[in-house]
Image (cartoon, coloured by chain):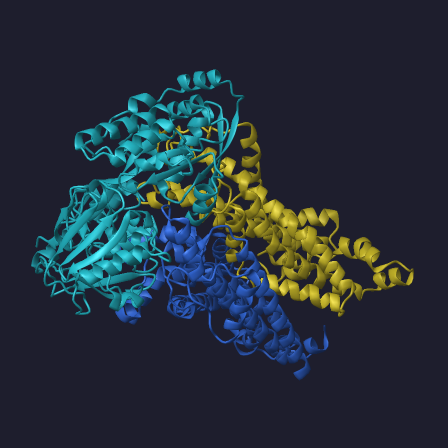
Amino acid sequence: MTYAFLARAGAASALALSASLALAAPRTDLTMGQQLEPPHLDPTSAAAGAIDAVTYANIFEGLTRFASDGSIIPGLAESWEISDDGLEYTFKLAEGVKFHDGTDFDAEDVKFSLDRARAEDSANAQKGLFEGITEVTVVDPQTVKVTLAAPNGSFLFNMAWGDAVIVAPESIETIKTNPVGTGAFRFENWVQGDSITLVKNPEYWGEPAKLEKVTFKFISDPTAAFAAVMAEDVQAFGAFPAPENLPQFDADPRFKVLVGSTEGETILAINNKLPPFDNVKVREAIAHAVNRQEVIDGAQFGYGTPIGTHFAPHHPDYVDLTGMSDHDPEKAKALLEEAGVSLPIQVKMTLPPPSYARRGGEIIAAALREIGIEPQIENVEWAQWLETTFRGKDFGLTIISHTEPMDIGIYANPDYYFQYDSAEFQGVMDQLNLETDEAKRSELLKQAQEIIAQDYVNAYLFQLPLLTVANAKIEGLWENAPTQAADMTGVYWTE
Amino acid sequence: MLRYTLKRLVSLAVSLAVASVVIFLAIEVLPGDPAAYMLGVNAQEDTLAALREQLGLNMSGWERYSSWILGLLQGDFGTSYTYRTPVADMIAERVKVSLPLAVYALVLSTVIAFPAGIYAASRRGRPGDVAIMGVTQLGVAIPNFWFAMLMVLVFSINLRWFSAGGFPGWDAGVLACLKALTLPAIALALPQASILARVMRSSLLDTLSEDFVRTARAKGLTRAQALRRHALRNALIPVLTIIGLQFSFLLAGAIIIENVFFLPGLGRLIFQSISSRDLVVVESVVMLLVFAVVVVNFAVEIAYALVDPRLRAGR
Amino acid sequence: MSDPRVDHIPPEATPFRTWHLAFRSRNLVIGSVLTLVFVAAALISFVWTPYDISKLAISEKMQVPSWSHWMGTDHFGRDILSMIMVGARTSIAVAVVAVGIGMLFGVPLGLWAAARRGSMLDEVIMRANDLVFAFPSLLIAIMITATFGPSAVNAIIAIGIFNIPVFARLTRSGALSLWQRDFILAARVSGKSSARISFEHILPNVTNLLIVQGTIQFSLGILAEAGLSYVGLGAQPPVPSWGRMLADSQTMISIAPHMAIFPGLAILLTVLGLNLMGDGLRDIFDPKLRRSRA
């Protein structure tokens, strides 16, 4: 049980392994671990991020797509023109594209996919992305025109989402179990409860994949994930769930650890309608009671960038407002006194399953007890969290990472679960939606960040990192996660 | 005997009917909407309604119960909400892991327990007996998931003899699968073997004091000879009963161990389905397990009655 | 019970002989000592623990055992010894109440069934018991806690329900043999109602059985609580519980094995202590069984 023994055992087998690998040819297969198994494989009819993690860019492609750095690049649409009034997008589609079942990809497929997503009986989890579309017209097989009701600065961004990928009417019936797309990989088989295998699509229209075969293996348990990477059962693990194990991988020459960014603002959400939290002073007290660094160290073992508002720090328009809510329990107590609330305050704190929430919740609860707020922790599953906390708004505090990109707009919706209702903020958002000038948009975004920080809507904790562990000889994995994806098209072994 | 069997059969049917109602009601009150879970935080009301319609969630409780039961009676377990595949297929897939695991654990437990119990009985009161009984006390007391964690630490992380979990699938070969099931089977078998060894020992000691064994000993057989020739067979009856009960326990009770070793078995299927509110799956799998246990109990009772006619008259 | 001389003590246990026997029963002594240690730890924790476990000290996380922290610290820098002491409270409380529920409902049901032996009522009670037995218990416990929210109270109910049939069956079978005895017959002849007989004459005579079984169920309750809180369905933080300590330690087992070892040992030793005590008590109360037990 001594650590020296562990280290020795690790080093010995590492040596043995590198010796045997030196003789082998460069590999063309990869087993990628991920925590969650997709419920099915239709990214256009469920919110499960695990579906996108397997299918995005690998099997399915959209008109536009995210690059690893979060920028929007052409996908199935080679190029596009936007009418001067910003209402008409004319997409020129790539040529020679075929679906995996051999059928041709053309403008009809685009019309089918977009119409299906915005239809009355659509089961698309992000139906809002398609809301502004009034008509999709096929101009010719290679050209499609999308008409919007109002100008929308983020339309191309919306079309890059995994929920907006192009599917074929010929194969839509069986998409959930046998997805047929246009991507560089084809679906091969699915051992439910264990793994999904993709193989290279030899007829891919773009640059072909370097790997011949990719297996996604689903390992939900963090301990098992650690052991599977250590035993090299998987050669890479995306969004590794246990940050506490990363130092061990880092110290082992067999592996490399990629620490990237996600779009996940992790926050202590506060029910703004629930007294006494409707008082901004009480919310400010909470913000000062929380020690961000302690949460990052204790829950995330140091991985995470502190944030002071609901915005991703890697975004050019980010404003660092962490100073407005630095750790200051004395100030917090003073604020509670000013607010004139009677202590202790009993409050329900619901915590969904991820470890940042469960561990972070315990740390924050201990900190809040110091200033006289007594959270009653309730650990819940996702289904329950969605029903009681998110939809039912039956909570006082909760911890959650908002992983949708550019989602500061949720603060403009007074019915959103934390129920922040500010005319000022809503005004800024309305302006933003109509504004097309980049400099002015940037100014408005900064203003929006400051308003919610000043109102202490929620306590902003940290930006969720993307932690990837991989064999040291693998290149081309996404370091950041602008959207949930495990894009395998550019991944290769160096030897 | 026929009358007794019929009586038992009727109560078996009643039991199953009551069980189905209890399971259905328990799941009805489970908070959490499967449709909301599937569509996530950005779902719109109309999308949710459309999905509920597709899933048949807007039917009344009675309609859903009766269609579930009618389906079960025809061997149709329904269709999973989340996976959209027949539940029967999912169960078949998971049974391929759970059943071999249960059998493996049972075999291990028997292989360990029989010699240990027999040896302890034959050395009653001597150091060998005391040592074995001491070890079985530990075996009964140890939380099996903790034992599993320790085994992972030693055999997977330190020694790397076994992978820490997962299941390669039977396509990967029987050997690879047995290897993957070894640590979980040991973790499951340890407490069972301890119980079985104790039952074996006391059952043997009981029979050893029965008249026919005393007679045999009076005829000049040694204690060990008497044990082998006469006591063993008679002592097996309670032992076999325990094995029968352990089997149904192992099939349903491996849920925590399946989680420790992330084995895609029935227990984990239920656990996952509860958290994703895939209620059809939960209902059908729990019902299946209850059915298995009730039938095993029924078989044990009938077997008992065959052996011991007094039971038939009783009750 | 390795001493063969014990076999010659006559079955009628006088108080003196009982104590005499108790001290000679290695099981009972070891078992009682272990049990007492944990009960004492739980009681002491109400007034004193080595460290305050409500204070987190992230900077001191995962320290290995040392003189200042005998069992090291956990991932929040809390003292594990203190956590185990307070956790003993949770385990013991859950198990005691669960056994209490089992006895409260199970014993009267068993007595009733025995009094109406062979009747429809007996059949219904016993079949209902079989049915509860047939449910995969852990699964139902998971469903109960999933439905009503994870908490110590729901864990108690979930474990308690499965204790009911255990006590009902035991009481019934114990009572059935008593109903044949002469002194019961005498009571019946004197016109006492069967309910009165059950409580005045049958119950006192099955108490020993119940105490022995209660000890065993108590240890099973501790194991069950550990299992439930291991899967996150027991007592909620910040209330410490042994099972959750194990769950928390799981991903850190290769960097901080002490976090997993001590709570596991606590469960193991408590359950072991209770089982040994149960065996020892059985030896005293039921000398006939002695010969077959170690």
- Asked if residue A160 lies left or right of residue B104, the reply is left
Across and down, in percent, residue A100 comes to 18, 66
Residue sitting nearer the eye, C219 or A162: A162
Residue sitting nearer the eye, A177 or B92: A177
Across and down, in percent, residue C116 comes to 78, 65
Across and down, in percent, residue A433 comes to 27, 36
Residue sitting nearer the eye, B285 or A399: A399
Across and down, in percent, residue C119 comes to 76, 69
Residue C74 visible in the shown view: no
Residue A26 image-quadrant placement: bottom left
Residue sitting farthest toward the front: A85
- Asked if residue A382 lies left or right of residue B207, the reply is left
Count of numbered labels shown in the rendering: 0
Give the vertical position of A470 relative to B94 (above or below).
Answer: above
Position of the C terminus of chain C by quadrant: bottom right
Residue C259 visible in the shown view: yes
Residue sitting nearer the eye, A39 or C278: A39
- Asked if residue C222 lies left or right of residue A254, the reply is right
Q: Colour of chain A?
A: cyan
Give the vertical position of C13 relative to A377 (above or below).
Answer: below
Residue A304 image-quadrant placement: top left
Position of the N terminus of chain C by quadrant: bottom right
Q: Colour of chain C?
A: yellow
Residue positioned 23% across, 45% down in the render: A155
In the image, the chain rendered in blue is B
Give the vertical position of B114 relative to B156 (above or below).
Answer: below
